[in-house]
Image (spheres, rainbow, N blue to C red):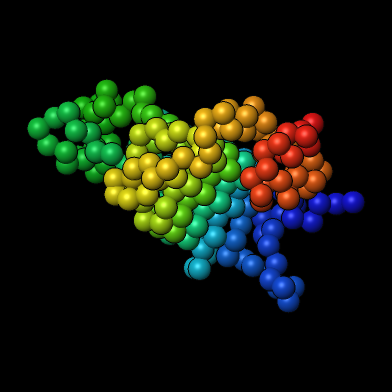
Amino acid sequence: MPVKFLGAASPYPMCFPDGRVNYGLVHLNRVIDHPNIEIGDYTYASSFEPPEDWAARLAPYTYPGAPERLVIGRFGQIADGVRIITASANHPMAGVSTYPFAIFDHERVGDYIGQISDLPDTIIGHDVWLGDGAVILPGTRIGDGVIVGARAVVSGEIPDYAIVAGNPARIVRMRFDPPDIRRLQELAWWNWPASRIDAATSALAAADIGALAELAP
């Protein structure tokens, strides 16, 4: 029997109760084809004003061939208005002026090459929820199972299963205690076959880690 809610190949995986397709919610790796962006299966974004170019909406400074990557894991949930600012957005800051002369005269790129090479990747883990209007700053590394509050401005490294909020974002609390987090890291349910995830949704919804472990492949 097919797993109805895990149609990874569909760009528009959600229908309203009356059968209408929700074109404002997309599986991102089915609508983004970008050499610097890697997105896992089932990760979706939603928008009240769906763009033609989802890559430009989410990560407008990530251009093809940029010296950094944006990597997002599986089963991510990205709300309306989220902006991911990758490292190419930064102006060179080591000199007297931050004015980007080279973007107007490409022959001047050599003056800045040491400052715009080896830029850090931005990494977002599996099963991460980015709340409405959240901003992710360059080089941020967000762990698995993290919840980012609405309008939070996130930088640095966020540990697995933290809840962060505010500007600058701070850890509000951890979702589970350390032994449970270690067990969840070992289980890595997001990598299971779709049929096993289908059988495990009750355990996932109830935070029943014991029941989840019994269903592991």
Nearer the observer, 5 or 68? 5
Q: In the picture shown, does residue 96 fall above or below 129?
A: above
Residue placed at 67% from the left, 31% from the top?
187
Q: Position of residue 169 (x, y in %)?
A: 33, 45
Q: Is residue 77 visible?
A: yes
> Is 157 left, or right, of 111 in this rendering?
right
Nearer the observer, 137 or 100? 137
> Is 170 left, or right, of 146 in this rendering?
left
Residue at the bottom extreme, as displayed: 18
> Is 101 left, or right, of 22 in this rendering?
left
Residue at the left extreme, as displayed: 96
- Count of marks, rendered view: 0
Residue placed at 75% from the left, 45% from the top?
200
In the picture, the quarter occupied by the C terminus is top right
Q: Position of residue 209 (x, y in %)?
A: 67, 38
Q: Position of residue 177 (x, y in %)?
A: 52, 34
Residue placed at 50% from the left, 68% from the top?
48
Q: Quadrant of residue 207?
A: top right
> Is 133 left, or right, of 96 in this rendering?
right
Q: Is residue 193 visible?
A: no
Nearer the observer, 21 or 108? 21
Q: Quadrant of residue 171?
A: top left
Nearer the observer, 182 or 188? 182
Q: Quadrant of residue 95?
A: top left
Residue placed at 71% from the left, 36% from the top?
210
